[in-house]
Amino acid sequence: MSRIVFAGTPEFARESLKKLVASGIRPEAVLTQPDRPAGRGKKLRVSAVKQYAQELGLHLMQPTSMNGADVLAELEALNADLIVVAAYGLLLPQTILDLPRVACVNVHASLLPRWRGAAPIQAAILAGDKQTGISLMQMDAGLDTGGIYATSSLEIGDTETAGELHDRLAILGGELLVQHLAEIAEGKLVPVVQQDSAASYAGKIRTEDARLDWSRTATELERVVRAYNPVPGAWTTLNGERLKCWRAVACSDNGGDPGTVISLSDAGVVVACGEGSLCLTEVQRPGKTAVTAAEFIRQLDLDQAAFV
């Protein structure tokens, strides 16, 4: 059986690790990012991968950087055939990439070369892509530029959020990894070179990216709401208060300047856009829980209101 080292951090990665273990593969070591302060209390948060690895008693490593001589020495001593990476979050230097007997393999949440980079799930929704999937990639020094061992695709639902798509892709990633890992380890699966001319990039998400710019089309803003649910959450301002929008539907209603409220009903708050309108159906005020449009209308006087 192949000797595997696994590197990953969030829930997406845990699904791949779970599938490996379920298939009978127990990694020689699991690498995950150091615990980070999170939440209002800034308590240290354990990653999803660390939690699962500890439950199984797997050898755990949490280096702050992959460039240290001690990290290299420890990994070298493991004599791995493959290093499997899924949403790890730390760059692997060439010295690490060269360590395994066969290759470093990345589980990437897009159909490469489309959406290389940090946020491929959000980018696919923002672009209105109808399809996405998982790519098993041989890692090299570039940003998701290595050859592709295998892919598996799925359709993106018309109302699907990034969180929902993430969960489906995480499962698909683990399944594809287990399906092809033995072939990769045995050298039977040769990676296919990517076409760089067809590449697109998905950069890191900034809070400002999730702001609803009402001069844009309703279709674009509906995608913004879906793409940034659950993180960081699409937002706008009303009466100086930042408002999160978790669910919305593009409508053809017109009338009023972008950001002005066109109509109010229990079904939603309809807001004018640069083209069409956006019906807000689930929103959240600061320090409060998310509510339906019907409840939101009862909380505030929205007559002649305008979102900025």
Image (cartoon, grey):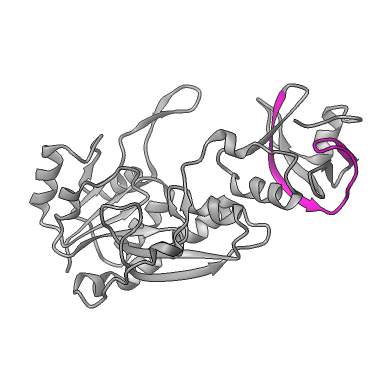
Quarter of the rendering containing residue 138: bottom left
Residue 128, compared with residue 43, is above or below; it is below
Q: Residue 107: image x %, image y %?
A: 36, 59
Q: Residue at x 89, y 40 (%)?
A: 262
> Which residue: 67% across, 26% down?
286
Is 70 above or below relative to 112? above
Would you place residue 219 above or below residue 133 in this image? above
Whether the magenta-drawn stretch holds residue 261 is answered as: yes
Picture coordinates of residue 249, whole percent (x, y): 76, 51
Region of the chain picked out in magenta, as a range: 241-263
Q: Is residue 240 left or right of residue 301?
A: left
Q: Quadrant of the C terminus?
A: top right
**291 sits to left or right of 126:** right
- Residue 112 in view, yes or no: no
Quick check: is 205 in the magenta stretch? no
Q: Write down the quadrant of residue 289 in the picture.
A: top right
- Say which quadrant the N terminus sits in: bottom left
Which residue is at a point 67% across and 61% down the rendered structure image? 158
Q: For the view shown, which residue lies furthest in the front direction?
A: 197
Left or right of 101: which side holds 279?
Answer: right
Whole-percent x and y of residue 148?
34, 68
- Residue 151 visible (yes or no): yes
- In the displayed structure, 82 sits above or below 72; it is below
